[in-house]
Image (cartoon, rainbow, N blue to C red):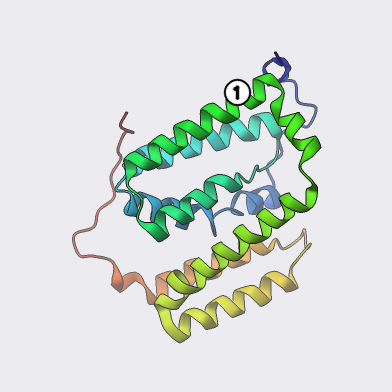
Amino acid sequence: MHFNFIKSWWQQPNPLRFNRNEFAGALGDIGTSLPLLVGVTLAAKLNAASVLVVFGVMQIFTALRYRLPMPVQPLKAMAALVIAQGISGSVLHGAGLAIGIFMLVLTITGGVDAIARFVPLTVVRGLQLGLGLTLASLALKQYVASDGVAGYALAAVVFLIVLALFGNHRIPAALVAVGIGVVYAVLFKSNSLPGNWSVCLSLPQP
């Protein structure tokens, strides 16, 4: 049994840093995780507080353990399936529990290392490419297209800005992209909010 990962949980040589690049990195999943979380919550009729709080807590634990963002590609693929096919919350809960148990068994038995030795890197890259294309297709069909020509124009402008700022540590691309989105939403989307909306605090439900 491999329990070394428990002993090394807090034994991390890299200190936590908080600067503009780290802040930009924290926004890296807004373009994928946040829309997918909202979409899954609405499609599967889940409790929003439970989804967001548990997701946030798991992200904090992951950061403390690995000191970098961990893209959980199978969960993003599952989210795309839930949104596209309208899978119910009970099926999603069962699938999540099954995947969690399976990954836990693989981790504590060392099965993950054995699988990593047999699975070629090209397979992993192919899965990442396929998921990326699925997410891009979902964005173009459901999110960008909802604003028509303005949506496509905004997406094109932000895409070009991200390419221009790629690798720029003084001006992180994520901060600029999110900032443009916030300004666009305030200027053109504030009137689309329902009249009876409100902000409140809610505790997660078991």
Q: Quadrant of residue 66?
A: top right
Find residue 83 and report its horizontal and vertical position in percent. Answer: 40, 57
Find residue 79 and report its horizontal and vertical position in percent. Answer: 47, 51
Height in image: 20 above or below 146? above
Q: Amino acid at mark 1?
A: Val
Q: Is residue 137 left or right of residue 90?
A: right
Residue at position x 73%, y 51% in the image: 123
Outermost residue toward the front in this view: 118
Residue at position x 38%, y 58% in the image: 85
Residue at position x 53%, y 69% in the image: 137
Residue nearest the viewer, comparing 91 with 43: 91
Outermost residue toward the bottom in this view: 149
- At label 1, counting other C-alpha atoms closer than 10 Å, the crowd grade (few under 14, some 14-19, many 20 or more) is few
- The quadrant in which the C terminus is found is top left
Residue at position x 70%, y 61% in the image: 172
Determine whether the residue tagged by mark 1 lies in a helix, strand or loop.
helix
Looking at the image, how many numbered discs can be counted on the residues? 1
Height in image: 171 above or below 87? below
- The quadrant in which the N terminus is found is top right
Find residue 117 and report its horizontal and vertical position in percent. Answer: 81, 36
Residue receiving disc 1: 105
Q: Is residue 1 left or right of residue 200?
A: right
Outermost residue toward the left in this view: 196
Height in image: 22 above or below 206? below
Find residue 171 and report its horizontal and vertical position in percent. Answer: 72, 63
Height in image: 101 above or below 63? above
